[in-house]
Amino acid sequence: MINKRLLIKNLLAHNGENSFYDNKLQIDISSKEGKAKFLKHVCSLSNTNPNNNSYIVIGIEDENNTIVGVDFFDDSKIQNLVNAYLEHPPIVSYENIPFPHLPEDKVVGLVSIRPKKNNSICALRKNIWKYWGGTVFMREGSISKPKAFDIEIKDINSELVAAIEKNSQNNIEMTLDGFHDFILKSRDYDPKYKVFKEYFVLCWAAKPKNVGEKIFYSRVNIQLINEQVKLFYSDQDEVEIQYDEDKFEILEYVHLGLPNTFKYYPLEKVSICFKDSMHYEIQSELVFEAPRFDPKTLRHYLNHNDSLLKKLKNKAVLTSAEKKELSSLSTIYLIAYLNGFEDSLEKLEEAKPLLKAIQKKAYQRLKDNLRILRKIKYN
């Protein structure tokens, strides 16, 4: 089993980006430009390195390979994006890898691109941003470029990739160090652990919260210690946790509503299933049903939201009451969009840079709401 933290260190220690490895400060698949650039890199690495795993490491300062980290990214539907836009797509996974020196809410993103079963050429299925459908990308050193179909693909990486992965295998010392590090960092949130199939060490920590007859957990941190992968992290949202000898399940809730009408709505169920063959699978199921509100009531809140957004654009001085209302601005736009007010999505995107510049709490709420939309879209 590969220790993903060690794998990232070994990739960074290699001689820069190449035909099987790339690093990025961040990626953004919420915009067409961001999606297109991500798909370009996946396509080019898959084509240039068809017989081996390829990797994209995210959260790296390019100038000196410094690990700075990115936000936890829990979109398990990234494969759906790849399938939708790429012809002969590879299998792609995104994992969140914690590093001891990073803040609790920061990780390093690891995109793994698996070799295809045959040597079919990966290409864009349809137009996106400035790239045309049918375009084939290849790597030239550290750069992804469009290429013609009649290219000759040479396998020059098999031995090197195999050596890097072999040197990244987990051992007992790494498992114990990872376990100790998790327990120490999580001591204020009642850390627990369970060993599945006598091999997989799963640790979790959370803050319990009673809501009626239910027990929710917030500040949830769940890690698979053997691979140094953070499986789940939530600073605000509440979850329910259940497990048996073979499975660990997380049911995530979101707290949504108009002012004074907030309720908990189930969002997604994630099941981590452990097999006897030293293998595990992560299955996710979207269980979200959007809350419904009277259109007239929504229009009233939207008019006030639009007025507040206009003030932000014009850099007008906000009253103390308006500053408090910023935290609910993105939630109102989200609910309105889910209830058929299509232009609310555009206003939600407009608010993103404005809230980021003015209020941390409101910006965090907006990111949470965009994550809900992303999960709904790819389902």
Image (cartoon, helix red, strand yellow):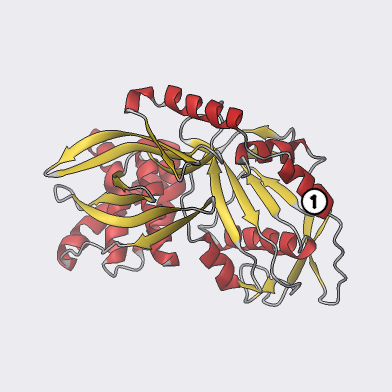
Position in image of residue 320 (x %, y %): 25, 33
Total count of labels: 1
**Which residue: 61% across, 52% down?**
111
**Which residue: 69% across, 35% down?**
9
**Which residue: 34% across, 68% down?**
342
Viewer-side residue, 11 vs 131: 11
| Left or right side of 102 for 171 | right
Let me know if residue 138 appears in the view: no
The quarter of the image holding the C terminus is: bottom left
Which residue is under mark 1? 142
Above or below for 22 versus 78: above
The quarter of the image holding the N terminus is: top right
Viewer-side residue, 360 vs 248: 248
Above or below for 319 versus 328: above
Let me know if residue 284 appears in the view: yes
**Which residue: 46% across, 28% down?**
182
| Left or right side of 303 for 198 | right
Disc 1 residue type (three-letter): Ser
Which residue in the rendered view is the most extreme toward the left? 212
Q: Quadrant of residue 2?
A: top right
Above or below for 144 versus 193: below
Position in image of residue 317 (x %, y %): 34, 37
SS at mark 1? loop
Position in image of residue 193 (x %, y %): 39, 34
Dot 1, crowdedness within 10 Å: few (<14), some or many (≥20)? Answer: some
Position in image of residue 228 (x %, y %): 55, 38
| Left or right side of 2 for 15 | right
